[in-house]
């Protein structure tokens, strides 16, 4: 953060610490006749440290003072170089700490234009932030760092009124109004945690938000669909909204529709919404029983790079529920995942799903039929990723203990290359346990003596 004549917090703390130490030393020198010479030396060093700290601070403050800071980089309230420029509803830019203080004090007008604010949401001005950072770099000043979101944004009646006005637009008969409101809601719910929190104040807000889609606009207006589904994603990030969103009867059917039809961004964001909503265990069951796993798996099979990761993470989280594993297997997840892994696509994420569903007997049977064992062994031999090796050995362990059909193939690999012995010695702690378990299983059947 650039200095503006005031010590940074770290410098203040350092100065206070030195002063405390100096006070103790001076007290000892003054009050004790036979004080140690070392005490005086320590006091001198403390004074020197304090002097150097003050001098360095003043030199940086002076540097900012003598430089001609561009007016557009100064906060209109403080007159100082902005550290976290944000845009007010009127379009004016201020430094966040100063405009936030005014809002906290109840001000609802723009300090420059004197206009009444339509809402009090502050939007980061990334363009000005970047220009300030570049200017500081060119003048040898440490670039200011944006203030992190502290969750202290103010929610006002003006914000509530603005939300209601936007929701009324989404419910209007005018398609142009619907699209304009949906785009604004998408932006505001992305930028402002306080605006996201507003949606949790009433169960009627979600149906109103989604009313254009429930009126059959899903397929006919993909841009409107994308904005509203993305808004739903933004809302579901807020912990207090998750249950409200997932329990609304409109949400899951619309998300499933959006996995099937819509822009690829809509599909990806629908999958991401399922991921965030399934953070709650009860929601995993609701989503699983809704039939959402099949379109998620179909989208995974479709293989669009933009959507793959969101889809994979959603399937993984849903499959942490035991019953959902069976649903995923019945929906064809094993065949889809193995084909992607064999093609080298999203291997780490898909191996994690395969590992978690390998406790399902039908999944094990399908893996064996589809040639999973040789594929997994190859990954263990060739991969540099310890986590991938761990997931492979977990799957092979479950295959070993589900029956004897693949023991010979696993035994031949151990005899020829010592693959499992090596992993038992050098893998992750979990991989070691599973590799040792496989070796013990092979030894019990009298199948292997190789331990290199």
Image (cartoon, rainbow, N blue to C red):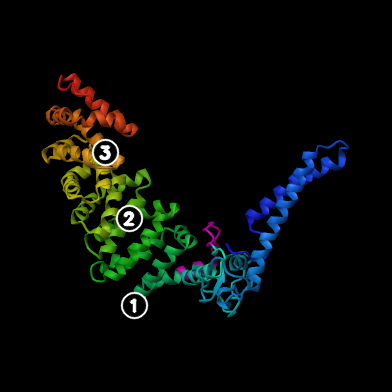
Q: In this picture, which residue range is highlighted in magenta?
A: 145-163
Given residues 57 and 106, the one toward you in this image is 57
> Which secondary structure lies at badge 3?
helix
How far is the residue under mark 3 from the one under mark 2? 27 Å
Q: Is residue 157 magenta?
A: yes
- Vertical side of 286 occupied by 34: above or below: above
- Determine whether the residue tagged by mark 1 lies in a helix, strand or loop: helix
Q: Can residue 218 be seen in this view?
A: yes
Image quadrant containing the C terminus: top left
The answer to whether residue 285 is left or right of residue 234 is left
Whether residue 367 is visible, yes or no, is no
Closer-to-camera residue (290/8): 8
Vertical comparison of 38 with 118: above or below: above
Q: Is mark 2 on a helix, strand or loop?
A: helix
Residue 192: give x, y in percent of width and height.
Answer: 47, 63
Closer to the eye: label 3 or 2: 3
Residue 446, percent across and down?
15, 19
Q: Mark 1 points at which residue?
A: 176
Decide whether residue 76 is among the magenta residues: no
Relative horizontal placement of residue 188, taking residue 354 as reference (left or right)? right
Q: Is residue 175 left or right of residue 62?
A: left
* Residue 28 vertical placement versus 65 (above, below): above
> Disc 3 versus disc 1: distance between alpha carbons?
53 Å
Task: Give me the disc on residue 241.
Answer: none
């Amino acid at each position: 953060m650039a200095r503006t004549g005031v010590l940074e917090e770290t410098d203040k703390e350092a100065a206070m610490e030195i002063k405390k130490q100096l006070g103790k030393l001076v007290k000892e020198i003054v009050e004790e006749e036979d004080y140690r010479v070392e005490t005086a030396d320590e006091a001198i060093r403390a004074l020197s440290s304090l002097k150097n700290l003050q001098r360095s601070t003043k030199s940086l403050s002076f540097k900012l003072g003598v430089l001609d800071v561009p007016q557009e980089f100064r906060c209109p309230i403080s007159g100082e170089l902005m550290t976290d420029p944000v845009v007010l509803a009127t379009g004016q830019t201020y430094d966040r700490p100063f405009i936030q203080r005014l809002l906290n004090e109840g001000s609802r007008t723009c300090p420059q234009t004197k206009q009444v604010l339509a809402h009090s949401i502050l939007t980061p001005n990334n363009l000005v932030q970047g220009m300030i950072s570049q200017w500081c770099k060119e003048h040898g000043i440490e670039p200011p760092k944006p203030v992190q979101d502290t969750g202290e944004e103010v929610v006002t009646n003006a914000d509530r009124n603005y939300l209601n006005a936007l929701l009324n637009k989404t419910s209007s008969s005018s398609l142009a109004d619907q699209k304009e409101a949906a785009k604004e809601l998408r932006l505001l719910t992305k930028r402002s945690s306080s605006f996201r929190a507003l949606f949790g104040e009433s169960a009627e807000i979600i149906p109103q938000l989604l009313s254009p889609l429930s009126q059959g606009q899903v397929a006919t207006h993909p841009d409107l669909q994308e904005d509203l589904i993305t808004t739903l994603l933004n809302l579901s990030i807020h912990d207090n909204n998750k249950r409200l969103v997932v329990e609304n009867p409109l949400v899951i059917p619309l998300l499933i529709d959006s996995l099937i039809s819509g822009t690829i961004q809509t599909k990806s964001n629908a999958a991401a919404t399922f991921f965030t909503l399934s953070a709650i265990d009860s929601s995993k069951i609701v989503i699983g029983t809704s039939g959402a796993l099949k379109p998620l798996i179909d989208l995974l099979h479709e293989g669009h790079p933009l959507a793959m990761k969101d889809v994979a993470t959603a399937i993984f989280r849903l499959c942490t529920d035991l019953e959902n594993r069976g649903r995923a297997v019945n929906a064809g997840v094993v065949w889809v995942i193995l084909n992607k892994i064999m093609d080298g696509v999203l291997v780490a994420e898909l191996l994690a799903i395969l590992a978690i569903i390998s406790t399902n007997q039908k999944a094990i049977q399908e893996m064996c039929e589809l040639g999973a064992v040789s594929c997994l062994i190859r990954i263990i031999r060739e991969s540099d990723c310890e986590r991938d090796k761990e997931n492979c050995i977990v799957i092979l362990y479950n295959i070993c203990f589900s029956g004897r059909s693949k023991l010979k193939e696993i035994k031949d690999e151990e005899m020829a290359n010592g693959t499992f012995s090596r992993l038992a010695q050098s893998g992750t702690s979990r991989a070691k346990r599973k590799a040792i378990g496989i070796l013990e299983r092979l030894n019990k059947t009298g199948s292997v003596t190789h331990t290199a």
